[in-house]
Image: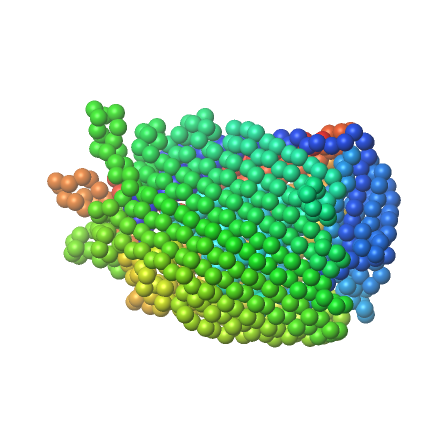
Amino acid sequence: MRADPIDHPLEVLMLKSTPVWGRRASPFLLLSLIAASPLCVRCAFAQEVGALRVMVVDASTQRPLNSAAVAVQPGGRAATSDSLGVARIGELPEGLYVVVVRRIGYVAAREVNVRVTRGKVSILSAQLDRAAQQLDVIGVTAEAFPKDADQDVSRFTYTADEIRRTPGAAGDLFRAIETLPGVSSSGGEFSAFSVRGGGPRDNLILIDDIPFDKVTHLEGGIESDEAQGGRFSIFAPDLVQSADFRAGGFAAQYGGKDASVLSLRLRDGNTETPTFGGRYDLLGWEADYDGPSRLFANTSVLASARHENLERALKLIGRADAGTPSFTDAIVKTTTDVGRRNHLTVLAIFAPEQVLRTVDNILTESDTNDAALYYWKETKAVVGASLRTLVGGASIVQTTVYAQRYTRTSQNGTAYPDSPIDGGRSIAARPDILSADESETQVGLRSVVHLVHGAHSLISSLELAGRSVGGGRAVSGSDTLYSFGKNDPRASPSTYYVVVTPQTYNARVARRVTDAAFSSSYRRALGADGDVTIGARVERDGLSGRTNVSPRLSASSPAWNGITFTAAGGLYLEPLLLRDLIGSESNAALPPQRATHAIAGLSRLLRPDVKLTVEGYYRGLRDLAVRRDETSGIEEAIGTGYASGLDVTLVKRLVDKFFGQLGYSYSQSRRNDHRGDGWYDADGNQPHAINVLGGYTLDSHWSFSGKFKFAEGKPTDVYVVHDAIFGPSGPMRFSQEIVGHNAARFPDLHTLNVRADYQRQARALGIDAFLDVLNAYDRLNVNNARFVERTGRLVYDGVRIVPTFGLKLLY
């Protein structure tokens, strides 16, 4: 249901668009026109040639491979990897190259758009997959569609170049993956994603093997934003080297979430030559370093920091009413090779943000549909170390220790544009009606062991985490909700509003808990490229005190005439979220949400770089937390649901001039709260969705790409409006009574995104430029409707055209 405008503090961050009776400009549309043309100035030496260092490793064992042939095109220069797996090619003229790596018994790897800069050594990692022995074509498949020892169905790997060139994403990974099968998004407005009936918070995210899901800025505040996630990634463009995505049926070493797994790998720093960069513009600044640590041998450092403050830009474009949002993120990663068998990475992330909207902001607005006042401050941080050790001839031990901290404080209130004060110079306001705070500190260990002996593999994991969680919420005096449903308590049937009081609303909780999990899986190879894996996961949820066993099973057939059959299933558990816990201390006893996955599909290799996949899935849900009503934070684990569908995807990987993807998804996602209303559509249910993505590299300088997306509109409520709810003597107010939850739909979403990239090496100057246009034909794609109690009308929020452009100069 919809709440009073004071529950809507993220209105400033919505790409606001046209209400049904009028139009207002989008601040982010206009900001994008001003925005981010980052100018990076990088230090270099005076030579006009550079060098390339390629590290060749086995993709499964991560062991160095000697005697691998490395060739660059154009030019035909070549080298062979040594006993450490390193191949060096020197005296290369500045420019962009294609690098091809080959070795007997392995599938050739190909990397496009590898930049060589004068006076510098460019670093490239080439991971080779073992070739199938009986069919050469199957071995070639792995070049574009890799497999490994824990291969799952529904898996896709994005390279850095594919992320960068996805139109409409502006280099943001979380917007780029919306084209993948089973992934639902809001057409580019939010930097978040939902998978096969889940929500943005149901996805497990690992960053260099460190579990950390606080990966977006400016999240939460209104129901729409909470359901769809944040708006900006914490990662500056070009930081992410690769992304490995599993859309369900994932193996037993992954747990804690029940929808998908996204494993991100950030770029390793350059161990040989340093690069400095910086940017300053209207929105803020950015600084970075990529090079040797200068303190420890064989250690590289990748450091990036940026700060964005939108206040000046919002004032410049006449949108000072939007408030003052700002955010910062600082990321440092070090990489160290300790001998030939140990690889150590250390990662630290610090990402604070804050947003403020006051009466002064509202007074600059001619259209006072939005009277919300709010302030929130949020900080998320993590530091961790991950050690990968090669054991024996083919086994791996990956051990990660980490600590993370999350805090958030907020105050929400409302102004009264129809109540002038100070002789009409200002308006009445209550800036701090609702307040809330959340905090979580976690120290953890995650260790995964891959023991390989011929066709047999044993994969075991151990996870331990100590957590300190706390927070609460409070209402000052009382508050009035002008949107309500039948379960919300009213003074009488003829009272068409809901009053929130401290007695039912206020809550506070503080807990110290220990979570633990252990998993073990046995994998048996079938033929050259098939396998079957059976495993189980034992999880101890410290918050509820429950221990559960989750079985997992997956299988992949050996390819027959290029066709592979896959299947997977299992039980997946997701403990209570922090924001649900602070609603009521009694919620801590709720059991984890349960999801049962069943997936089956087939794939056909049409060419070494072209693959057709057809996959059906069913996701059964139980023990879903259902809130008693909008005045109380008490929840009960009585909800059930399901998500089922079919995904058809044709993928052409980026290994030459063309890349593309064509996908169709049919899905149904339904819920039942068991409160007498029966089944209804889940928030993100979009039964039909089509994605068409294509790109073309014209030459070494120009490349172009485009993406078209169609999806049925997301569900929305059916309601009736009551007027003069306070009677003739009170202020004129309207209210909205929800008579059908998610019983209607917003208009269909469709959008065209286009992108052009330009790269050139002009003597000492490297030039990278792009133009990226989201929603090129400027159609309003609605994702939320807000009820305005002073007028009784709806304001529709969504995204229209958003052009972004950038320029980077490298020296």
Whether residue 261 is visible to the viewer of this picture, yes or no, is yes
Q: Which is more toward the observer, 101 or 377?
A: 377
Q: Position of residue 244 (x, y in %)?
A: 62, 56
Q: Residue at x 36, y 40 (%)?
A: 375
- Name the residue: 86% across, 49% down: 79
| Quarter holding residue 45 | top right
142 or 402, nearer to the observer: 402
Outermost front residue: 295
Residue occupying the point 31% across, 51% down: 473
Where is residue 92, by image quadrant? top right
Instruction: Give the quadrant of the C terminus.
Output: top right
Q: Can you say whether 108 is above or below 413 in the image?
A: below
The residue closer to the viewer here, 523 or 789, is 523
**Residue 456 lies in quadrant:** bottom right
Q: Judge whether residue 666 can be spotted in this image.
A: no
Residue at the location (21% across, 29% down)? 421
- Answer above or below: position of 561 versus 657: below
Q: Is residue 257 left or right of residue 615?
A: left
Q: Position of residue 166 (x, y in %)?
A: 62, 45
Q: Is residue 506 left or right of residue 461?
A: left
